[in-house]
């Protein structure tokens, strides 16, 4: 758009206007902005999750030698099985408070390396598997306010039926969670199991190639209650209750997409405006086949995204080219319904020192226009073992990166202890006139219920104000487990006086659309999001 063809020279003023975006004319940054939140979090976050208290659990692994933050209160970790330190007085998990950019240390005993997780309906984080003594562990973290002292609890009674390293978890409509796959493990199981035995899934064996490109499978809960599962280059719809594959999809063109090739995936926003009838999945990036086996060659990462309408009768991959190649990126959904693609490298794949040329520029994908917009660059490389999550204020927290087996604080890709935030353009103060601030909303709703949200906004809304419910995922290794965005049914805003407007909305009709959990509720007016409030959905 706005490109002039060579044979139709434009008058100078018009040419100038066409060359500048509106934001540039107004003198504001056009491609988001970066800020450093904390110079030293003490750990490199391999796994990151936002609690409904608004603080963020950062989790590394344990058998990595000393971190850069000591446990408090003279506590140490005694572990005769630890490969590196038998007595370790440093922390490998912390909770970060975005309100004042501080951290509090947490105590974790067993090895969480390459583990998985998901929030339960009551807001408890369940965290599963890992390596060594952590392989079969089930851990919980019941979050608390930033003045609290909540900490990890490692279950002594509940264990995984199969030890799992590199699995993916998804919250289910009945409030349990499913744990899918893992290294050398072609099964799924449930937490809590409630007596259900693990189930063999042949699809996971079939997608396990020489470089095990089926790890951290992309699992999305579909509105019909089935699971979309993507591994390597293939995907299925699974009825996990009957263990039947109800649909298979064409192989995605291009590179393998899962760990260690390390592309990423999101399910695009589900929306009431089409009766929640259309479901699309986006898969972006990855690494050339053979990269993991032959890492010294640092092949150029995948430059493509595949988009597929899972609900179509004969779905096919619509391939699109990103502005730059990317492996080890993170994909997340913004309240506006855009997809942020952030972090990663332009060459290589996951593994120790297997990457080159950090991709410093995030990209924002518009599902409506099917276009990509390159964002401003950070100065901090985030390669293997980096994470990104959305905060309730609309910023994106970026943490971690460690392509080394231990903490190495120097070199081209140091163990990264800095925490940054990326602010997409919707946060520009130039947009404050249309920014909807939620001043009242119910803290809890049931399914298919009418509820009222009051917003304050300077300029009278000219049309519908969207209400986006976003889950809080567990993010690790390029995939945000359990991420979903539901745009609920809304009526037109009604003027309530004093710059306030009420919106009558309807909560998601079923738990398959939005499993019971805490969600961030964002109001979005003319493409501009305000900060979220937490809203719990329960039966
Ligand atoms: C951690 O404790 C050790 C031993 O007491 C001390 O030498 C070190 O300086 C402390 N590190 C930090 C980051 O406080
Ligand atoms: C690894 O890369 C080298 C150099 O490009 C190439 O000669 C070799 O065939 C590759 N091996 C594999 C297994 O891909
Ligand atoms: C939701 O409630 C509306 C209005 O009461 C009703 O028409 C509709 O059938 C309900 N939907 C479901 C899925 O129960």
Image (spheres, rainbow, N blue to C red):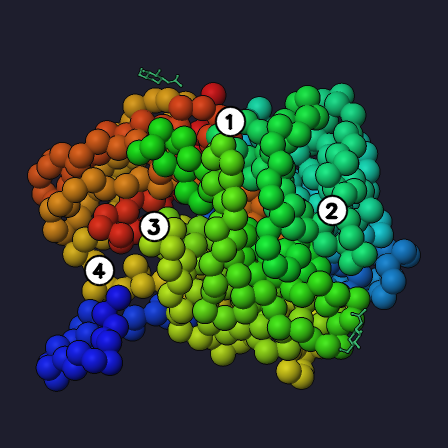
Which mark is first along the chain, 3 or 4?
A: 3
Up the image or down, 60 lies above or below 463; here it is below
Up the image or down, 342 lies above or below 39; here it is above
Which mark, by number, is residue 207? 2
What residue is disc 3 on?
A: 368
Label 2: how many residues lie within 10 Å, few (<14), some (14-19) or many (20+)?
many
Residue depth check, mark 1 versus mark 2: number of the one nearer the observer: 2
Which mark, by number, is residue 224? 1
* Residue at figure coordinates x 69%, y 75% from the top left: 298
For label 4, the SS is helix
The reply to whether discs 4 and 2 touch (Cβ–Cβ < 8 Å) is: no
- Give coordinates of residue 495: x percent, y percent: 11, 37
Q: How far apart are marks 1 and 2 (CA)?
A: 25 Å
- Give coordinates of residue 19: x percent, y percent: 23, 77
- Give coordinates of residue 172: x percent, y percent: 58, 30
* Nearer to the camera, 417 or 30: 30
Q: Does the residue labelled 2 lie within 8 Å of ligand 2?
A: no
Give the residue furthest to the right. Answer: 80
206 horizontally vs 465: left or right: right
* Nearer to the camera, 240 or 161: 240
When asked about the image quadrant of residue 365, the answer is bottom left
The reply to whether discs 3 and 2 touch (Cβ–Cβ < 8 Å) is: no
Which mark is first along the chain, 2 or 1?
A: 2
For label 3, the SS is loop
């Amino acid at each position: 758009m706005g490109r002039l063809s060579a044979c139709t020279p434009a008058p100078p003023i018009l040419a100038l206007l066409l060359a500048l975006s509106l934001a540039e004319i107004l003198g504001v940054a056009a491609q988001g902005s970066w800020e450093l939140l904390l110079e030293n979090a003490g750990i490199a976050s391999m796994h990151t999750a936002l609690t409904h208290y608004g603080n963020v659990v950062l989790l590394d692994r344990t058998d990595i030698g000393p971190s850069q933050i000591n446990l408090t209160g003279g506590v140490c970790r005694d572990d005769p099985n630890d490969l590196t330190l038998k007595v370790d007085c440093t922390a490998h998990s912390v909770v970060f408070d975005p309100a004042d950019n501080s951290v509090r240390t947490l105590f974790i005993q067993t090895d969480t390396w390459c583990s998985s997780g998901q929030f339960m309906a009551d807001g408890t984080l369940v965290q599963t598997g890992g390596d060594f003594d952590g392989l079969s562990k089930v851990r919980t973290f019941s979050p608390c306010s930033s003045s609290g002292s909540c900490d990890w609890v490692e279950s002594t009674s509940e264990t995984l039926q199969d030890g799992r390293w590199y699995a993916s978890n998804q919250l289910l409509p009945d409030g349990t969670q499913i744990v899918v796959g893992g290294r050398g493990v072609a099964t799924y199981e449930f937490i809590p199991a409630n007596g259900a035995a693990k189930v063999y899934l042949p699809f996971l064996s079939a997608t396990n190639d020489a470089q095990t490109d089926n790890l951290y499978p992309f699992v999305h809960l579909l509105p019909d209650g089935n699971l979309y599962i993507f591994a390597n280059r293939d995907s299925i719809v699974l009825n996990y209750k009957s263990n039947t594959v109800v649909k298979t999809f064409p192989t995605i063109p291009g590179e393998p997409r899962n760990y260690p090739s390390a592309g990423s995936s999101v399910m695009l926003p589900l929306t009431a405006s089409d009766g929640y009838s259309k479901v699309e999945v986006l898969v972006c990036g990855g690494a050339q086949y053979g990269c993991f086996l032959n890492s010294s060659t640092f092949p150029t990462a995948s430059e493509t995204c595949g988009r597929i309408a899972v609900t179509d009768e004969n779905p096919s991959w619509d391939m699109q080219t990103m502005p730059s190649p990317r492996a080890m990126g993170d994909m997340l959904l913004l309240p506006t319904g855009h997809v942020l693609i952030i972090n990663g490298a332009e060459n290589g794949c996951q593994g120790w020192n297997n990457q080159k040329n950090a991709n410093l520029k995030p990209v924002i994908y518009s599902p409506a226009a099917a276009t990509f917009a390159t964002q401003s660059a950070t100065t901090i490389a985030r390669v293997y073992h980096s994470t990104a999550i959305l905060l309730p204020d609309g910023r994106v927290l970026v943490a971690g990166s460690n392509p080394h087996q231990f903490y190495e604080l120097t070199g081209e890709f140091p163990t990264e202890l800095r925490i940054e935030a990326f602010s997409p353009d919707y946060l520009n103060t130039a947009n404050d006139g249309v920014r909807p601030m939620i001043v009242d909303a119910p803290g809890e709703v049931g399914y298919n219920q009418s509820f009222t949200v009051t917003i304050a906004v300077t300029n009278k809304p000219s049309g519908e104000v969207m209400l986006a419910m976003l889950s809080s995922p567990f993010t690790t290794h390029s995939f945000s487990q359990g991420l979903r965005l539901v745009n609920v049914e809304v009526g037109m805003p009604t003027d309530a006086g004093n710059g306030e407007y009420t919106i009558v909305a309807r909560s998601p009709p079923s738990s398959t659309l939005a499993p019971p959990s805490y969600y961030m509720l964002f109001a979005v007016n003319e493409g501009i999001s305000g900060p979220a409030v937490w809203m719990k959905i329960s039966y």
